Amino acid sequence: MNLLDLSGLGAFVEDLVMGDTIQISRPAGPPVLNPATGELEEPAPHVLYEGPGAVLDSTAAPGITVPVAGQPYPDDPKNTYRLLTPPRAPVAERDDTVRVLRAAQDPALIGRTWRCTQPGLASTVIAVRVTWLDENNPKDPAP
């Protein structure tokens, strides 16, 4: 069987678009009581992936999906960000956190986080993995 191999296209996209270093992490468990403070604290997250990727906003070309034959509609308009990662990266799950560690072009990406709104897309024929994101609200700056 000769399946279409898009790995060359994926490598091309990785070289030209995935210039940022991104991190995908997942909560390591429920909050834990700190006996010294009496506060619940989140355990350090489990880092699933750290490597090349790109966060694209809504100005990137939208896609069209067809859930029912003959009824096209634009990709989810509420989620304005998408994450691109190489297919070799682990598939992000819903509610995983994405962070940009190094930005190739836009320094405004550093320090922002996004929540994965659904698992990363998977396909028989794949060049890059796409994951829909929702930006987390930034925390108020310290006074």
Image (tube, grey):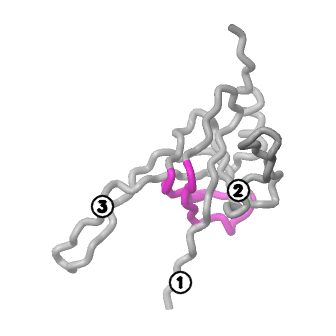
Mark 3: few/some/many CA within 10 Å (<14, 14-19, 20+) = few
From the top left corner, tell me how far across and down residue 133 is, in percent: 62, 57
Between the residue at mark 3 and the residue at mark 1, the CA separation in whole angstroms equals 24 Å
Q: Looking at the picture, tell me which residue is in the foreground, 78 or 85.
A: 78
The extreme top residue here reads 1
Between the residue at mark 2 and the residue at mark 1, the CA separation in whole angstroms equals 28 Å
Circle 1 SS class? loop
From the top left corner, tell me how far across and down residue 143 is, in percent: 50, 91
Mark 2: few/some/many CA within 10 Å (<14, 14-19, 20+) = few
Name the residue type under label 3: Pro
Residue drawn where x is 71% and y is 16% of the image = 3
Sequence-wise, which precedes: disc 3 or disc 1? 3
Q: Looking at the picture, tell me which residue is in the foreground, 103 or 43.
A: 43
Residue drawn where x is 72% and y is 56% of the image = 56
Q: Which residue was labeled with disc 1?
A: 140
Q: Quadrant of residue 13?
A: top right
Q: Which residue was labeled with disc 3?
A: 30
Name the residue type under label 2: Asp
**Magenta stretch: includes residue 125:** no
Which numbered disc covers residue 76?
2
Circle 3 SS class? loop
Say left or right for 29 vs 54: left
Name the residue type under label 1: Asp
Residue drawn where x is 74% and y is 19% of the image = 4
Above or below residue 125? Residue 138 is: below
